[in-house]
Amino acid sequence: MKLFVNDDIRAIELKTLSSESITERTLIERVAAGAAHEISMRWRPNKRTVVFAGPGNNGADALATAIELSSRGFKPEVYLFNIGGTSIKNECQYFRDLYNERIADDSLHEVTGMFNTPELGPDDLVIDGLFGSGLREGLSGGFMSLVRYINESGAQIVALDIPSGMFGDWDKSALERNVIHATMTIAVQFPRLPFFLPNKADLAGEIKIINIGLSREDIERRPTNYFLIDENSVRSRLRPRRPFSSKSDFGSALLVAGRYGMMGAAVMACRGAIRGGAGKVTLYGPQCGFPIVQTAVPEAMFESDDNKLVVSGVKPQHPYTACGIGPGLGTNELTVNAVETFIKSSKNPLVIDADALNAISRRPDLLNSLPANSLLTPHEGEFDRLFGECDSREARLKKAIDTAKYYAVFILLKGRYSALICPDGKIYFNSSGSVAMATPGSGDVLTGLLTALMAQGYNSKAAAIIGVYIHGLAGQMAEEIQGQYGVSASDIAHHIGPAIKSVLESNKR
């Protein structure tokens, strides 16, 4: 799914108005119908409902939604902010008059000056239509105080389009306490970029996306640098297997992983690669890992380093089609030397994770030796060690864009809504996953899965898009059985096969 910034969304809206010969009011009515449906699916009409409408189109959305809710049995109390009596825009004025015409019960309070805030509590439902995604400056004065009061009331809050106080594009300056803390955000046609940033995603709550029929032709035609990885985008990239295939058709995955006391990471990577469909999986590790790997993952082959306890020199004895390096390696000086030598001698893209990333952070000049299109998979701590401290997810993403371009690599920044940053500046946010996946070894399974996909001939970008989504979906499937607390990395690996099957068969459902 494509994601767009404010200017692009507005251009798509204008194209829709022109091509369908409709007015802005039609789009507002579509927003209201979708929002009222989502609200009435969650809350009953006897719920006290308080609507706050700002002076612009977001306020018009709120007024139109209040009209729709009234037709469904709700009895909203509406507060329309028209400071000075002349600040509301044309569409907002139109729906104000329509509300008064259809619902003649004095439930609409037009605020032109001093405002007595209605008493709110945990049993109430608030509809937030103060300010939408076009906001350019943080809230201040009375609106800031109102937003803080709403948040502190404990009421359940539905934000229309975007929580008031949040910017629709990159959001670097809005203070969290000055932004609506929504229970649910009803996003119009597209989720917004801040929804994928940890400190902002929590403020948006549950995301519901409503389709208001914006021009499909213009959406498909319009370029963007932002995408959401979903089931459709993964299914379109996955290649079903031909009936007469053999294991030789699915590549040879080499994993360089493990040290004394950390062979579990190597085992998890092997399991991820096996479940990811590689035709052959080989672990290159220290001698101490031989009995562990041959027992825990008998499907994998083992090639032994000269050292008993750590990897001291990567010297695989057979050809391979993709390599993943890093899980559980440690940063012993011998190992760091081995990582440096191996990277400098490699010609094909590598999957680089965990301690291989830490080894590079100790020798930053190695970044200049990375094979083009290699896939780096850091979590936030590893990213900061590699490229310098960042004070926010947004700052990391912006730095990752510059870094991926400069070194011609792909960076998969792991976390909730893991983000794939490409050398061309495009960012793909992953939609799958669960908090249950915050468990030891989860990232090692992902490394194995990514390596398996690249071994099968998927390029780095396709492997990352497929792999991160399948990994997240496998975690969700594991959670259904084990619950949020009980999922292990082995459970995630176990569900990779069913996750791939689910995606391939999704168009049949």
Image (tube, helix red, strand yellow):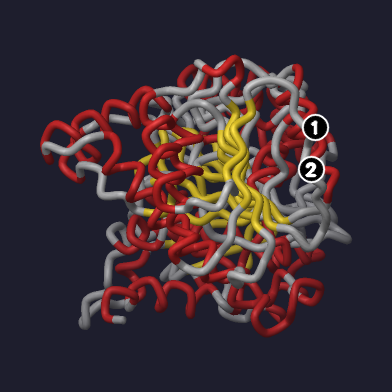
Which x, y percent locates residue 410? 48, 35
Residue denoted by label 2: 151
The Cα atoms of the two marked residues, 1 and 2, are separated by 8 Å
In this rendering, position of residue 11 left or right of residue 40: left
For marks 1 and 2, the one nearer the N-term is 2
Q: Amino acid at mark 1?
A: Arg
Disc 1 to disc 2: CB gap under 8 Å: yes
Q: Residue at x 38, y 43 (%)?
A: 98
Q: Quadrant of residue 264?
A: bottom right
Secondary structure of the residue carrying tag 1 is helix
The local secondary structure at tag 2 comes to helix
Residue at 86%, 59% (x, y): give it: 260
Front-lying residue, 352 or 311: 352
Please determine whether, in this image, residue 425 is positioned above or below residue 147: above
Q: Residue furthest right?
A: 261
On the image, the x and y values in percent for residue 361 come to 74, 27
In the shown orientation, is residue 293 left or right of residue 191? right
Residue 338 shows in the view: no
Name the spot of residue 255 as percent of width and height, x first.
Answer: 59, 56
Amino acid type assigned to the residue bearing label 2 in the image: Asn
Measured along the vertical axis of the image, is residue 32 above or below residue 219?
below
Vertical comparison of 415 with 72: above or below: above
Q: Mark on residue 177?
A: 1
Q: Which residue appears at 27% of the width and 26% of the height? A: 11
Query: In the image, which is nearer the foreground, mark 1 or mark 2?
Result: 2
Residue 214 on image: x %, y %: 25, 43
**Between 93 and 121, which is closer to the camera in this rendering?**
93
